[in-house]
Structures are given as C-alpha cells and as structure tokens.
Amino acid sequence: MRTTGGFTLPGEAGCEALTLRLAERWGADVIRDSDGTQLSDAILNAGYEIYSTICPIRGHNTWAKEHPDMLQQCFLCTLPCVPAGERAEIPLTESFFSEQFRINDSQDALRLWQVFDRTEDRLLDRAQWAYEKDAARVVVRDAVPFHSYTVSFLCYRVWEEISMYNHVTNGWTEEHLMPIDPIYPEAQEYLLRWMDEWCAAHPATGTVRFTSLFYNFVWIWGAHERDRSLFTDWASYDFTVSPRALALFEREYGYALTAEDFVNGGALHPTHMPGTPQKADWMAFVGRFVRAFGRKLVDIVHAHGKKAFVFYDDSWVGLEPYSGSFGEFGFDGLIKCVFSGYEARLCAGVDVPVHELRLHPYLFPTGLGGAPTFMEGGDPAADAMEYWLRVRRALLRAPIDRIGLGGYLHLTEAYPDFVDAVAHIADEFRAIAALHREGAPWCMKPRVAVLHHWGRLRSWSLSGHFHETDQNDLIHLNEALAGLPFEVEFLNFDDVLGGALQNIDVVLNAGFAGSAWSGGGRWTQPAVVEAVLRFVHEGGTFIGVGEPSAVEGRAAFFRMAPALGVDEDTGARQCHGKWRFSVDPCASSLPEGSFVRPRSRYMRGIPFLTDGAARVYKAEAGLPTLTAHAFGVGAGVYFASFENTPENARLLFEMIVDPLRRNPRPDFWSDDPMVECAWFPACGKLAVVNNGVCARQAAVSLPGGCAQTVLLQAHELRIMTLER
Amino acid sequence: MRTTGGFTLPGEAGCEALTLRLAERWGADVIRDSDGTQLSDAILNAGYEIYSTICPIRGHNTWAKEHPDMLQQCFLCTLPCVPAGERAEIPLTESFFSEQFRINDSQDALRLWQVFDRTEDRLLDRAQWAYEKDAARVVVRDAVPFHSYTVSFLCYRVWEEISMYNHVTNGWTEEHLMPIDPIYPEAQEYLLRWMDEWCAAHPATGTVRFTSLFYNFVWIWGAHERDRSLFTDWASYDFTVSPRALALFEREYGYALTAEDFVNGGALHPTHMPGTPQKADWMAFVGRFVRAFGRKLVDIVHAHGKKAFVFYDDSWVGLEPYSGSFGEFGFDGLIKCVFSGYEARLCAGVDVPVHELRLHPYLFPTGLGGAPTFMEGGDPAADAMEYWLRVRRALLRAPIDRIGLGGYLHLTEAYPDFVDAVAHIADEFRAIAALHREGAPWCMKPRVAVLHHWGRLRSWSLSGHFHETDQNDLIHLNEALAGLPFEVEFLNFDDVLGGALQNIDVVLNAGFAGSAWSGGGRWTQPAVVEAVLRFVHEGGTFIGVGEPSAVEGRAAFFRMAPALGVDEDTGARQCHGKWRFSVDPCASSLPEGSFVRPRSRYMRGIPFLTDGAARVYKAEAGLPTLTAHAFGVGAGVYFASFENTPENARLLFEMIVDPLRRNPRPDFWSDDPMVECAWFPACGKLAVVNNGVCARQAAVSLPGGCAQTVLLQAHELRIMTLER
C-alpha cells in the first residue's frame, strides 16, 4: 500500500526528471536544495513545497574580506614549552592548522593573551614575556628552567568548519568560506539586510531551512597530518569568543572571563566534563545573544510569508532544543539528522510545530569515517535499512512528523535497491506516524530519569552522534532507552534538589568519576546524596553504570554505595579483602546473549561488594559486573559498563522493570530481544517490529496472561488490531 | 662435588636419625627448631650450631590472662550505617571476627572512640551518641536521615595472627595465643625476665632466632566466611595502637593522634598509599620504641654468650632493615624467607654480619593459598627448584652467607626427589657464595634508582611477598631488577631534592596515580619535577610505568610528560584527537616474546603521545604501550604496565641500557633471555645460568666483540674460567 506525504526530497537542477520521478516514488511533498545543489525553475514550479537551505554566517566572503576583524575567533593554547635554560621561546602556531587560524595580535586581543607557568599554575606578569610578531612566538626571559610554559592567544578562524568538512570529504576546490561573527553590529546589520534580500530573491521558497546558525561545532585542527584533529566537540562554546563578546559579558556579569576560562590548561572544557560556573555564565550569555539575533532573522523570514525551520546538527550553540528557551527563536520546525534512535527521540520531544528527521545515508559518495556509500564498495540500501531499524524502534515510542534526505540526488541513479529501500522506509514511517495521530502509545509504569550534570539541556544526546561519543556508556543507554516503552526524562542535580524525583521511578546515572555524565562534584553535596538515597529507600530504583555517583574525598567512592551495595577500589583498598560471591540463580532468566564488560572506559579500579548483600547477576574474572541490592523497599542496580545490543537493551529493560526479579513479565512485551512492540490503546493497534536480519517468531504478552504469537520476516513491521 | 656449610636444617625431636642424615646430606652446619617442633638432646649434642626460635610477644597466655588490659590493641571502624530516620544504631563488632577482637570500652579507651557522619566528613560531638554495652552498639539519636555513620573504636586482639595462621593452615587445635603489648612497663619487665630465664634454660642454643618481634603483620579478619579477610598489610602500623602509646606520642610530639588518623574513613593507610605526616610521625615514634626495647632483649641474649638473629617476615614494624636505624638492635644476623629474587636482594643489602635465606617450600603439608606441598598432589621438589631459579639469579648479583629451611623435617621422608633437589640447591648456593668471596661481580654502567614515596625504607619489597602485591607493576620490576647486572638504589623524593640523582643514570617510577609507588602528591612539588627533568635533559633515563609521576591538578597528568612524550587521557581529553603513529622499526630487535599489556591495574585512562616525537616500540589496539622519547640528551621511556617474565626482564634491561636503540650490545651478556650471566673479574670466572626448563644454547658477549657460546642443560648453573 503506497502512501504519500511527510517526505522531503533533495532535488537537483539538471536532474529534473529524476527529481520528479523520485518525488512521486517516495511520496514526497517537499523538495529541498542542499549544500552544493540548486533547484531549477522546473522543480520549483512542479507543485511541491520548497525548502531552501541557508547558512547565515558563511558564504559572505566578499564582506568578510572587507571586515577581517569581524571573523569568528577563539582562544588557542600552545603545547607546553620546557626550557632547559632561562629563556623560553614558545612558538604560537606551530601545532595548529595554518589554513584554519590567523593570529589576532591587535591591541584589543593582545590584552587577552596569557602566558602561564603550568608547573606552578602561575599566570605570568605581562612584563615577563614579549610577543615577537615576525617569528610568531612569545619569549619568556626569566623562565624557571624545566618548568612548562604555554601561551593562550586569540586568533581568527579563516575557514569555516562545515566548508572544511565538505572540501575534505568531497574534494571540493572552491574558495574557503570564512565565518563571520554576528556579535558585531556591522555584521548584524549586514546579515539582516542579506536575509531580507535573500527572501525577496527566493519567491518560490516556502520554508527557509537554517542549515546552521551562527556558531558551529568546534573543530580545532592540527598542523601535522598525524595529528590533524586536536579537539572536536559539537556542544562546545569555544568558537564564540571575541574581544567584543568578552567586553559585553563583563559589563553584564560584573566580572571578566580570561583566556584560561576557556583553554583550561590546554584541556579546554569538553561537554563530557562538568565545566565551571564561569562556563555556565558564558553559555547563558551567548545563548541569549544567539536567540535574540536568531529571532530577528526568523522574523524577517516570517515577514516574507515563509516558514523558518532549523537543522540541529552542526550548530548547537544557543540552539539547544531543551534549553527551555528554544521557543524564543520562533522556528516553525526542527530538523534532526539521525543515525540512531536517540536522535529521533531528541527531535520528537521538542516543543515546536514540525519535527522532521533527515535520514542517513546522506547522498554523498562517502559516509562515516570516509567509508564508501554511493561509490564503488558502498551499499547505500543496506546502510539506509541499518539506520532505519535503529530509528524505527524510537518512532514507535514518540511521534515524528516528517522524514527526508539530503545531498546529490543523481547519486541514487546507480542504486535502484536504495530507491526501493527508501520507498519502503517512507511507507513504514507514514504507517507509524498514522498510529501516533490516533493516540499516544502505552507506556509501562516505571518513569525513568537520566541524571547528569547537564540534565534537560542535553536530553538524549551527549555531544555529537553515537559514533563520536560511543566510549561513554550513557550514549549506549540513551540508544537502548530510545526504543523502550518508558517515559524518559533528563534531570540535573538542581532538579533533584527541587523534588523532581517525586514523579520518577528509576534513576539512571552513568559515567566515569568526575565526568558530566556521572555528575562530578555535585555528588559531594550531602543534600543530593540524601535525596537520591531517600528516593531508593522509599521504593525507587537507582541504576548506576561505570562509576555512578563517584567522587573522591569520602570513605565511599560511589556516594550511592549504600543503595548499590557496590563500591569501587581505586587502588587504596587493595589490602582490603573483597566479599566472595556466587552468581545468583536468577541470572539464568536474564536475556540470552546479554553481557556486561567488566570495565567501562576511564574506570579506574575494580568493583567490590560493600556488605555482601548484593545479588550478583553477572561476573567476570571474579569481579561483579551486574548486581542488584535491596535498600529500603527500593533497589540499587550496578552495571560495570553498558554496550547497546538488542540483548543488552532487553537486559536494561529487565533491570528497570524488575531489578530484584520478583515480578511476572509485563504486558505488551515480546519474549525475543530482537522483537519489540508498541501498543496504541486509542486505536487498539499493536505494532511489532523485527529489528533483526532473520525471520523471528515471538510471543507478545497481553493483558490477562495470554500471549500473541507473531512470525515476522527480517526487518518486518507488523501492525495488528487486537480484539478488545 | 659435595660441599658443606652455610646451611640451616630444621631438626625434629623423634626424628633424630633423619635429622642427622639430612644434615650430612645437605651439608648443614646449623640445626634449628621451628614453630611446632623441638630439638632433642641427641640433636642438640650432635656437634651442630643450634638456632632456637622465640616469638617474644606470644606464648605467654598465663601472664596475658592475668593482664587482659595489656594485650595488643587496634582501632576498628564499623561499616557505614545509613539510617532512614533520625536514630542510627551502629553495631560495633557485627562484621569482625569474634575470635580475634574484644571491645576495649574502658574509660581510657572510650575517650578515644569516634563517631563520624561520613557523608559530611564530620566528627560527632560526644553528646550526640551513646554506647550501649550490652547490645555492643552505638546509638546516634539526632542523625540526619540517609547520612552514613561509622564508629571507630578501640579493641584488644585476643588471638595473635601467626597463631591464627598456623591454626587455620595446619589445623592446630591448641589454645589460641594472645599477643601482649610491650608498651606497658609491666610487660617489659615480664619479657626481660622471661628472656633472661629462657637463655639460662637453653644452654645448647648458640643463636636465638627472633622469629617475630613485637608487632606482627596486620590481619583484620571478618565475621563472615565469604568476607574473612578485611585487611592485610605486612608493613602496616595499625596493630601498634594503645591508649598508653597514644599518650606517650602526644607527650613527645605535642599533638594527639585520633582514631581517624588510623582508620581513615575505613580505608586505613595501606602501604601502597603515601599516608599522612601523622602516620610518618607515628611510624618514627613506634620504631624508636621497638628498637630500644628490642635492643634490651638482644643485650640479654648477648650477655648469655649467644648470638641474636632476626627473621624478617611476619614482623616488620620498627624492624625495617633499610630504616637507617636497623643497626641499633645489635642483631648478629638477618634471616629472610624467600619466594622471589627481590627478597634475596633485600636480605643481601642489609648492614648486618650474617645474611641468611630461608628457602621455600616450608616443610608444611600446604603452601601458598593452601595448595598441597608435602601431601597428596604436591610436588615439593618442583616447588623448591622453581623458587630456587628465581632466587639464584639474584644471588649472582649480591652475596648471601647462608640458606636454610623450616618446618617439619619428617615430611620430607616421602619425598626423596625433594631431598635431592635441596642437596643440589645447597651445592649451587655454596658455589655462588664462593665466587662472591673472591670479589664482587661486575656491574654494568647504568646505576638504577627506583623512586617512590618510601624510598630506601621499602627497598626491594612493597608490603609483602610477590603474590601478595602482584597487582602492582613495581613488584614485577623489582623482581626483574633483582637478577640484572646493575647497582640498584631506592630513593624517595627528599633524596631527589637532596641531589641523589647525581650518582644515578636511570630513574624508575612505577605505580598508579596517587599511590606511594608512583609518588602521589610529591609530584606536585615543582622542585621535584625540575630535578627529574633536569636529570633526564642532562643524559639520564626516566622509565615510567603505569601512571608514572601522575597527579591531578595541572595541564599534564604525568608531570614527567615533557620527558616521556606520553601522557594519559583520564577522560577529560576524549574530545582531543590523538597522534597517530606507526610502530618503530627498532621494535623488531626487542626480545622475542616480550610484551606490555595495555593497562596496568588501577590505571584510569589511555596513554597518548604529547608531541608525536616518541618512538613507539609496542602498541595494542591503537594505543602506545612502550615508547621512548628523547629529552635533551636523555630519554623518557614509558611502559603502560610491566609483568615479569624472562623476556620482559630482558626488555627492561634493554630499555635501561639503551632506550633509544643507539648502542651495540653490552659485554658479558647473553643473547637468550632465559640465560643470564655474571662476571666475577677478581677470579676471572663467568657464571652462566639457565633459568628455563629446557636446554638452551646461548652466546655470551665478551669484551672486544667476541662471544662465548654455552650449551646449558635445564636449570643449569655453569661456572667457567675465562682466558685473560
């Protein structure tokens, strides 16, 4: 049964027939251009709604060259220089990619440079160092031999990162695009005029698609081929710095930020770490600016009778959809590109009229990590199905309005399998969307909260796509949760102190000690520990993964050890004997093929049982890897690590619904981890999906203790009406 | 060729013929008794020198029962109690072995008890808690719900640990022996009289063998069978506590120690960690007492015309042979039991007239971890050879005067292979000892220093035997070094600041961050970093293993990163790209079969190259595991971990003599890691050993570039005279 609508097709001038044929085949109602493609009049006038892509801060090289002091900037910190004598000569740019950065040694900027003795963590007085412009270095004259010196300096970015990416990935040879900084009134004036003129010049455009906003992901590239990627963080605010922004901040906040507040000894402040109060202030400051100026552009778009959608992928700064202030932009739609299910949940949960997913693969010759896609060696149909299976299970839980693709449509011509796969995906998407329109799917009782430093702001995602953050257990947990039948919230520690756990049944905390994901120093607050322990004692479940609630400085490393019955020996307890244990008999009822690796990345030591009372469900090399422990009438569950697989997602499900293995199986749940289902009570329909590549037969439990047996082909989605 | 002398035989009353036959067979010149055996007159009068075993603080149960308040004591800290309401009832002894401990709730003792809110790290005021004697618990009445409360309390130890060990290991059923504390004047008076009477009653005894001294290893046992071993530390001072000692300390030092100074939140202060200045003061205080009172006992022994030897194994407190004050005891000999080569080096390096090794296996039915030895399933001859091969390579480097055995001699009757093996070992020992008597073996040029918190005090050993501390890289390194042809010193950080590196070529630092072995907080001292960096820059080699020089709080985690060219990402740098590298071509010249595991126990993160200049010799899963990096005219070598094997000992040797792979092979060195040699220039003899169980042919390099080929049988020791 072919259906239409809710599909955005990337058109391509010169491929009009293909464009219109695939629009028909895939049931498209919207045609868009992409970075690198245009739409011709034949396409614009074919009766489809038109999305047009804009990237406000690049593509203005003429203006940028006339205003070289209004390019975007950032602080860089040199590698440490360790003099053997009393003279330290510190090269500034030696380790950085010369095509990306240009030193800003204006008077305004030089005032902001800092030279540190990193051995003593001591800021040098300005009189102790001199900048030698011609040699592009700083010289410290009375250095302490064998101390480490660094220079933090300001520089312009002369090549915008998405332009860098497209050149590198697709062999583009066009002029490098420069990013202009809208913090400057002249730049704002220019951009507002440009936006207005652009709208006037594009009468066929119904929706302006902001493909990025102002400040894109932070990519600091290195000089050396073997060390090209110095720093990568999608959520970072490091590329928002300028003397003007710093001055405005100081005026508003009453204190000044310094280079060190950003470079942090060269470590910067990656999103995986909790950052500082100063960083939080800066994020709030920049966020307000981005939303205020973004709103002005959106208003212009609206004034031209067009809609404004934003693509949330390359540009996160100020645009975070869960900041609580996203609505201030006035966007009409949010488009999220998705490799994974959690990205679909991220999109679905945002308060915005239209939620759209841009599926992968992108129509480019190469995909992730340079792997072939639409070229020799690629199999884009298989890629599309793989991504779709990840996303589809999330779509069963939360509604999405639209899907679409991006890139060069002509690349699909050699891949009829891909064309078929997308047609199939589009039909499945529309079938699922139709279920949601009849009423929300049923959720099981436990309401799950993921607790971390960022809370709601970083709902569902960490700081990039799955493959960019997959050394963190939490992204695996997010991905598993994305397709499980629970309400999921993301809370921070202030939420906990504010009583948010009253509406929660299960708290999940996952990360290494000190990270933003485990919570870092917030666990030193007694009130936090009290609140979460009380929550468990009164019947909640605390699921800790990796080094949950861990922080140095007290007798217990895991502050939630009383609930978990597990703590970690980081070396200081190697003279302490550990409880011996046997694996609990209940372990045999856990999903076959599920596993827990004994160590999460960046975990220091080895777990041990604190009071011997935890039930050990899994163990490896004599160490507990999965345990459950009663505390009051609640439970603490410890996972040494978590890696998302269908079986492990099922394992997580079981620990959420029944950590102490007391209850019978829940309703509307299949007996096969490869098969998941969603019950839509309003229409009486049960959607069952086979996430695997083999046919499966599964029994879905129904209320009253009976079960429905379903035989599903590979990948199949089956929607059944249940007798009531 | 049979030789005699330098051998101590454990005799056994009732087995006189066996005793004298084996004394003849093994070339014994001394016969001793053991814990659990006596010597009869027939043995005492057979013309051998006699050692008699005493254990001063146990075996006085009659006196002990009359003075129950003069038993040895310690502080114990309960498990945390987490009340859900405002009343916390904290059981004191529930988790401790009731046969080992008895609460000391005397007035003097109660003053020293402490109750802590561990959530806030807050000491409770005495008015906030009450001791309920009958229930053996402490009650906190106005507790904060969900905070963790502990009680630190004083208790007597009513079962001495060696007595516990012998009961448990050998099924002894005699009365439990109680440890008396010589800190009390009455106990001192009693012990001095007893020592005098003992000497008078044992006219045949030539040497009094102090099998332990006053304060033995710390073993805190648990109540539960699955949790029997709560804490084990041979070097700990936790069993030296008493109200009297604390009062004397306060009078001398002008400040009082509290329970918390010992229990440290339940973590105690294991020797693997650096401890506190208070702990250092306490160790010095107790050490002086032990030496002063020990000297009085030794003086009595001397007054009776006997010698006093001490066995360094179960009793470390104050007896540390490298404390710098060991000579104050006036002992005539030091006996060390040895499983490993490093223990032989420990013994050999002590300034004392006679150095004796007590070989393993001990003549007991069971050995390590309860494994069968002289019983069904045991192979004591194989055990003896295995231990001997470990020890023999160390004996080639440093002289030992005597060897011996201990235990029940009758057990050997069923094991003629063992009798043969010991005869062979005794002959080899005497051959090696004879070489040393002609002059010291040749050492290669690099002088090696192991740098850690304890320095010389803990030369060679950590805090127990190899198998007790083998999760630490350093014990593996010590064992490898024990048989390598280098001068080895153990330095602490004050030594470094005092200029000790002037006489050193290679510094070795090995341990996890924060441990005593890596150095913990001492690396925060700029002067330490300066001194070690300068040492490398001027030509030294710094070999760092695990998390060398690591400490939080600065830009670099490894403070020696400038020398190593390697640092560790503990999670905060996961957004930072890492240098890609290829394994250096020189890697092919490293010992075949050598390996470096990618992670040392308690290592947090992943190593990365700081400046891309380190040569990577070994790597695993894309991570460098063995690197060398030029710094000035010296080098930094990084091992991710170190496990001792013949091949890895050779790898260490090569990194010590030639980290940057510049030089030809040294003289007097074999081309086979299984074969080691020692050159005794004074007598012109070359000793070559095969440490393996197969015959080996090796070429030993000689001065002038020629080589001597040697074919050795399994285990063989060959002593050759070289033409000169």
Image (cartoon, coloured by chain):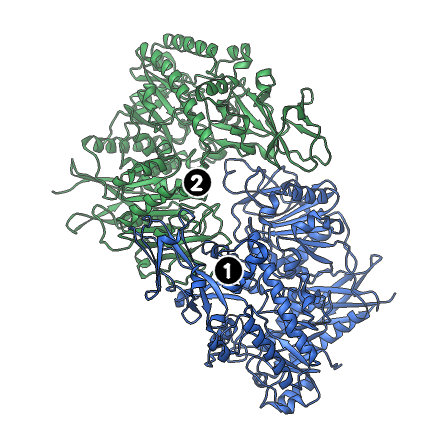
Chain colours: A green, B blue
Quadrant containing the C terminus of chain B in the rendered view: bottom right
Q: Judging from the image, what secondary structure is the residue with disc 1 in? A: loop
Q: Visible in this render: residue A594?
A: no
Label 1 belongs to which residue?
Answer: A575
Gap between marks 2 and 1, in whole Å?
27 Å
> Could you tell me residue A452's position as x and y percent?
38, 38
The percent coordinates of residue A210 (x first, y second) are 39, 19
Looking at the picture, tell me which residue is in the foreground, B266 or B592.
B266
* Residues at marks 2 and 1 touching, judged by CB atoms closer than 8 Å: no
Task: First in sequence, mark 2 or 1: give its number.
Answer: 2
Is residue B527 positioned above or below B381 on the image? above
Chain to which mark 1 belongs: A
Task: Say whether mark 1 and mark 2 are on the same chain.
Answer: yes
Residue A521 is tagged as 2
- Number of on-image labels: 2
**Amino acid type indicated by mark 1:** Cys
**Crowdedness near tag 1: few (<14), some (14–19) or many (≥20) residues, C-alpha within 10 Å:** many
Q: Secondary structure at mark 2?
A: helix
In this rendering, the answer to whether A457 lies above or below B400 is above
Residue B438 image offset from top left, x and y in percent: 82, 70
Q: Can residue A233 be seen at all in this image of the molecule?
A: yes
